Image (tube, rainbow, N blue to C red):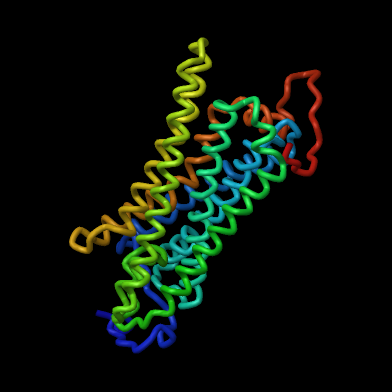
Amino acid sequence: MPHAQRQQMSNGSSITHFLLLPFAHTRELQLCHFWLFLGISLAALLGNGLIITSTACDQRLHTPRYFFLLNLSLLDLGCISTTVPKSMANSLWDTRAISYTGCAAQLFFFLFSISAEYFLLTVMSYDRYVAICKPLHYGTLLGSRVCVHLAAAAWGTGFLNALLHTAKTFSLPLCRGNAVEQFFCEIPQILKLSCSHSYLREVGLLVVGVLIAVGCFVFIVGSYVQIFRAVLRIPSEQGRHKAFSTCLPHLAVLSLFVNTSVFAYLKPPSISSPPLDLVVSVLYSVVPPAVNPLIYSLRNQELKDAVRKLFDLRPPGVPSNPCSLLIVQ
């Protein structure tokens, strides 16, 4: 075992760096991992970037629905940009190291992104519920000020959650080496390095966080149950198909995100293994940011029209509108 992994340290400040878990040990597989993650990152950057630019540039998309979608795309970019680049760099340069400060920053920004995104998805389910089940009250319940406040609440809650967990995690004494059994700095893996019983308090915080996440998930599912009940009353078969084809993929990705993240943070140590942890972490930290743009834009004619107009791919005689500041209507 390398000397860096045998270090016995009295507290976290003695650690200058951590060693992340590599995806592969052979050079060929390391390069394969690099190119795979590069493709996923570019797809996420392109998809979310197009949503952000199109929403900001097309006046027709200045509505609460697309305002929340713009925020979601920003958080998706933040989430995938926090973990994937460092893992790619480590595979490319055949290294495992990440500095102590870099690990703390990575943990904070990752928690901030996924927490804020999850709360934003809860807000978006409420937006869809009001739009479909209470359309006459939509302008009143989701006015400009309300939308800004809801988005700010999601970002603020994510920030506070990340700050609390990061501060608590890195205040623990770490004396079981510096090898993190994950491709990025993750709370359960950092807790394994602690030799203090005070880590139980952080575990308690994680349980509370998971309970809140489950509560949000129940709210989201409840909203969509009401939406589906309203959709089933739509006389047009085409209208029902459009609503279901939009909602079901969203629920599928959301379920994948919730189930894998809950499993990653609350699974029993007896079933924990590096390969399993690696797969689960990819499913909840890498897949959703790359897939969300497809879920929200592939079947959305308004967004596709906005993208065409962005690249001036409009039919002859149809004028394009210049970009303007995003105003929530």
Is residue 241 at least partly visible in the picture? yes
Q: Relative to 81, does residue 138 appear above or below in the rendering? A: above
Residue closer to the observer: 194 or 225: 225
On screen, residue 9 versus residue 87, left or right, reads: left
Q: Quadrant of residue 225?
A: top left
Q: Quadrant of the N terminus?
A: bottom left
Residue at x 63%, y 31% (from the top left corner): 303
User: Residue 265, relative to residue 1: is it above or below?
Assistant: above
Q: In x, y percent, where is residue 3?
A: 30, 85
List the single residue furthest toward the left.
Answer: 270
Q: Residue at the location (68% across, 48% down)?
A: 148
Residue shown at 34%/53% (left/top)? 262
Coordinates of residue 163 in the picture (x, y in percent): 52, 68
Residue at 31% x, 83% y is: 175
Residue nearest the viewer, comparing 185 with 230: 230
Quarter of the image with the C terminus in it: top right
Q: Quadrant of residue 127?
A: top right
Residue 80 position (above or below residue 89): above
From the viewer's perspective, tell me whether residue 131 is left or right of residue 29. right
* Number of marks in picture: 0
**Percent coordinates x, y for residue 48 in the rendering:** 58, 44
Q: Nearer the viewer, residue 235 or 281?
A: 235
Above or below — where is 19 with respect to 235? below
Residue 43 can be seen, yes or no? no
Residue 288 image point, x, y percent: 45, 45
